[in-house]
Image: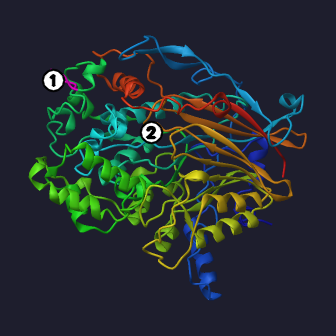
Amino acid sequence: MSRIRSVATAAALNRRTLLAAAGAVSLTAGLGLALRPGDSLAAGASARRASGDSAHPAAGESPAAVTRQAVSAALAPYTTGTTLAGVAAPRTSSGYRRLGDGPGWSRVVRGELAAPRSGRAERRTALAAFVQFTDLHLMDSQHPLRLEFLRSNDRHAWRPHEALTVPGAVSLVERVNSLRGAPVTGTPLHFVMTTGDNTDNNAKSELEWFMKIMSGGRITPNSGDPRHYEGVQNSGLALYWQPESTVRDADKQLGFPQIQGFLDAAIREVRSPGLNLPWYSTVGNHDALPLGCYAHGDPYLAEYAIGGSKLMSLSADEAKKLQDAIKNATDPMGLRFRDLLKAHARDLRSVTPDEKRAPYTPAEYLKTHLDPQYTGRGPVGHGYSSANVDAGTQYYSFRIADDVIGISLDTTDAGGHYEGSIGTAQLKWLDKTLQDNKDAHAVVFSHHTSQSMDNTHPDPARPYEGRHSGAEVVALLGRHPNVLAWVNGHIHKNVITPHSGPDGNSFWEISTASHVDHPQLARVVELVDNKDGTLSIFTTLIESAAPHRTDFADLSQTGLAALYRELAYNAPGANMTLAGNAVDRNTELVLKKG
């Protein structure tokens, strides 16, 4: 019997009796069987210590909090509000392109891992359904540490829409709240999972905004001077879009509009209803590392983050050298970046200091998730537990449904650089968790993709522990027939990859585009049993609830969310292939039942 099943069956409430009337399992908000991970994880850690295994605590060994509710009958399948029905598309052909309603993306059946059999639509039963958010990159756009000046070398190193990440993300929450269950099966949605880069600069201000967006609350997306914006967009520098100025900046030359009141609107209070579903959190490199690439530890950079100076311009040659150092991982500790800032002390502009911009530590990230004011629809900790805090880990397992578990990994390398890997202890824990739950289907979540896990810098907290690549994780997952999918983000592009392991085991890797770069998407994932020896994974992409058309005079919260999308589409240097191909968007992914 798996560990998850043994824990669940110990609950005082007869779960099977509860679920029999519903005919399904749901993690929607409401009545809960709250498994207390702190207790069970502590017991697991104690058992390991008693056996002499003290190399790594057993955080995440049993499932995180589970919320259950008897659900109503399944709803009918639908397309409204998804990219099956329509997608934002340009309605002008040149210059700054205005968006409007475009045709939807059709669903593609993929049979690389198993042949789809006729009649499966009539036989299938739903196992689970959830929504994936990824790469929200909620951004304190006035933060001193931001690297906007790299735009002198790379046009897309700064985006004209960066001040609008908060209203854009709230609109995505509103979209999920409007969905009538899962689009294909009509089954109720169980939860939302974020797969990392929830924040952009590893700043406490951004972490607070993220928690309120997801759980509900009022957010003022501003830092520094509470009265007005002070950053690159009112600097007078032609390198950046100056929305309220007559300056003929580089973006206005491409057709970007002049919008009076834009910056005041961008830092105005925003209200989030919070998700009406439970939500879980996975950590990404921008959540864990300053700027997503530098290891913690340099006191100068920490002080600069909260201080009263900001570098806003840099020569193209110097920008290229810094950007190359980041891309090539030759400066994982940020020493070259620190020296550059010191060398340009006379070029710094004055801004209002703000301690809320301080970088947060992994422990602070965990404790913020456990803060009762951010519980929202739950679960408490959003996957993380006090055992994670005690062990210094950010990975865990949880129950998705009666026969499905979820596993959230931490693929960020604390030694620096934006690419990922995992440590030996976590790799062994993943193997054991899958083996202990071999009678349940498994979905693995992470930030990094298998192809972007090639960074093996030592973890400063565990300098003698080995680091393991994405190829090694693929090999491990391929040894477990219960793995259905590996769901991730990081690359800001829709890509779906089939993986075949030994003994005929196989799974799908589902990578989803970001919500900061065009086309700003999230993904609904449905797991079904076709009752013919195969399973299907349906993926359906969704946009935010903001209208496709924009009105430059509409600076309301909804108007800004619509403008966020249109500005992202027009961002100079933007990669227009991030939506992926048809086979990476709305799909049915068939695989053999393990």
Please give the residue where the numbered disc 1 appears in the rendered image: 247
Q: Tell me the SS state at disc 2.
A: loop
Q: Is residue 244 magenta?
A: yes
Identify which residue is drawn at 50% across, 68% down: 393
Q: Mark 1 or mark 2, which is nearer the start of the sequence?
A: 1
Identify which residue is drawn at 37% across, 52% down: 324
**Residue 510, image x, y percentages:** 64, 43
Q: Tell me the SS state at disc 1.
A: loop
Q: Is residue 482 left or right of residue 560?
A: right
Magenta highlight: main SS: loop
* Amino acid beneath label 2: Gly
Q: Is residue 177 left or right of residue 104?
A: left
Identify which residue is drawn at 20% across, 30% down: 264
**Residue 518, image x, y percentages:** 46, 30
In this view of the protein, which residue sits in the foreground, 292 or 239?
Answer: 239
Please give the residue where the numbered disc 2 appears in the rendered image: 274
- For disc 1, the neighbor class at 10 Å (few under 14, some 14 to 19, many from 20) is some
Bounds of the magenta segment: 243-249
